[in-house]
Image: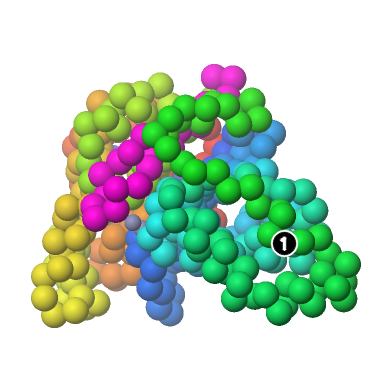
Amino acid sequence: MYRPFSFRQTQMTHSSVTLLGTKGGPAIRPGTPMPTSSLLRLGGKTIVIDAGLGVTRGICDAGVPLTGIDAIFITHLHSDHYLELGPLIHTAWTAGLKTPIPIYGPEGLGAYWRGFLASMEADIALRIADEGRPDLGSLVELQKLEAEAFTLFDIKVSAIRNQHPPLADSFALRFDHQGKSVTFSGDTAPIEEMVDFAAGSDLLIHEAMLTEGIAALCARVGNGDDRLRIHLERSHSSAQEVARIAARAKVPALALHHLIPSDDPAFTQEHWIEEIRPFFDGMLHLGRDGMIIEF
Ligand SMILES: [Zn+2]
Ligand SMILES: [Zn+2]
C-alpha cells in the first residue's frame, strides 16, 4: 500500500525547510534540478544549509530577501555544496546587507572565502569607494564546524561527522527549537550513528541514491574507468538504506534530496517509492527544487 507523495506548496511558516536545490553532484544540464542547498525557517530565524549553484536565485524565489539570512552552514567542501557561497554573500551585500552573517563550515572554507574576496577585489573596492558600501570582508563571521553541539540564537545546533570519503570533515546537522526538530544527513554513506542522531526529529532530510540508476549514470557522465561508481557506492546512501535508517529513527517524515540520478528519464517517482516503501511508511517527500516542507 503506497502512500501518495506530498507536493504541498503552502505559505512558509515558522518551521519549514525549502529544498532550493535537490540534485546530487555539481553538473547541470538542460532541464536538471540544481545542486544542493536548503533554506531552514526555525524559531523565527532563516538559515541556509549548503550553498550549491543556484542558491541565491533559490532564496529569492522562496520569497526571502538576501538581507534576511541569519546564518549559513556548509556541510562539506564538495563544490555542489559551496560553489555559490561567495556570490551569495556578495549579492546579499549589493542588496543592502550591513550586519555580519555567521557562517559555519569545515576547515578550508576560510581559504575559499579569502580567495573569493581576492578574485573580486577590484569590484569590492570600487563599490566601497563609489557606493559607500561596508567592507564585504567584515560581513562574514567564519566559524569552524566540528562534531559538537552549541546554541545559535536560541536554536540548539548539533553536528556529527558522517562518512563521506575521501573527505574527513563532512557533517550531518540537527536543529532543535522548542520541540521542533529537523536533521540533515549531509552527503554520507549510511551510518549507524544517524539513527540516534535523527531520533526525535520531526523531519529527516537525507541524501539518496537509486542503486539501479548508478550504472547508467556512470556510463553517461563517468570518465571511462570505475572511479565514479566506486566513489558513489562508498560515499553515498542507497534509497533502501535511507528508508531503513528513517524507520529505525522513527521519524514521522522523510525527505530525499541530493538525488542521484536526478535527470535520467528512465527513473521516475515510482522507482524511488519502490525502494523506500518496503521499509518506511511515514510521510515521504521526494525532493524537487522549491519544495516547501513544514514540520
Ligand atoms: Zn554532494
Ligand atoms: Zn559530497
What residue is shown with label 1?
A: 136
Q: Is residue 281 visible?
A: no
Question: In this image, 45 relative to 39: left or right?
Answer: right
Q: Position of residue 47 (x, y in %)?
A: 60, 43
How was the colour assigned to the protein in this rendering?
Answer: rainbow
Tell me which residue sits at (15%, 68%) in the image. 227
Q: Is mark 1 within 8 Å of ligand 1?
A: no
Q: Which residues are drawn in magenta?
A: 160-179
Q: Position of residue 245 (x, y in %)?
A: 25, 33
Tell me which residue sits at (39%, 68%) in the image. 26
Q: Which residue occupies the foreground of this view, 172 or 279?
A: 172
Question: In this image, 217 relative to 156: left or right?
Answer: left
**How many badges with numbers are in the image?**
1
Residue 58 magenta-highlighted: no
Tell me which residue sits at (65%, 52%) in the image. 140
Please tell me whether residue 41 is drawn above or below residue 43 in the rendered image.
below
